Image (tube, grey):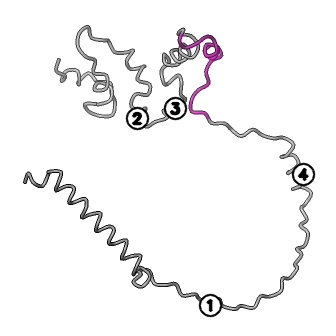
Amino acid sequence: MKHLFDARTQKCWTELIEKEAYTRIAWRDKYGAKYSRIPPTILKKQSEVPKLPARNYTLPAIHVPRQQEEAKKTAQESPSKPEVFQDMRPVTPQVRTLLYDGFSKERKGRYLYLEKRKAKHPEEKFQYPVLSSWEYGWRQGDVIQELQLPAHGRLRTVNDTFYSRNGVFHKLSATDTLATIN
């Protein structure tokens, strides 16, 4: 098996492959036209259809009633702006002024602007959840404020608010509190 991986055997294989490629090219040059895979195209005779002389047709003039003309004029005179639909709520002027004040390297300007925008919750920045994955956490801040954070350990916000023991409501009834394990 070692003799298959030495340099002499590899050189032999490359020469055989090159020789085969050159042989194929030489055969195609010599016999390619005679034994072509693609059949020669046969020129089809174009059907001779007599061409008719072009006729000059004129259409009658279109008369628009006066009411339609007046409606068009009033529509053209008062250009209405197309309704712009925005996903994100506009920035307050105070936050916008931060954008143009200073450089990011100095922790001013764009850096401070992005920090202020990041501090807001998504509910304050957007009118509705843009992505379907946002729906799980949408308005989650209201629920978290009601909860008391444990001194040690983890907070099971999703488990306590999203999943329900019985029924649709996430609030536990008096009978459910008796069955919970502390």
Dot 1: element? loop
The type of residue carrying mark 2 is Ser
Between the C-alphas of marks 4 and 3, the distance is 41 Å
Q: Return the residue at label 4.
A: 70
Q: Which mark is residue 128?
A: 3
Q: Nearer the viewer, residue 121 or 16?
A: 16
Between the C-alphas of marks 4 and 2, the distance is 51 Å
Q: Residue at x 18, y 51 (%)?
A: 7
Q: Nearer the viewer, residue 12 or 66?
A: 12
Q: Return the residue at label 1.
A: 45
Between the C-alphas of marks 3 and 2, the distance is 12 Å
Q: Earlier in the sequence, mark 2 or mark 1?
A: 1
Could you tell me how many numbered marks the image carries?
Answer: 4
Q: Quadrant of residue 104?
A: top right
Q: Residues within 10 Å of mark 2 (few under 14, many from 20)?
A: few
Q: Return the residue at label 2.
A: 133
User: Picture coordinates of residue 1 (x, y %)?
Assistant: 7, 54
Q: CB under 8 Å between callouts 4 and 2?
A: no
Q: Nearer the viewer, mark 4 or mark 2?
A: 2
Position of residue 159 relative to residue 66, above or below, is: above
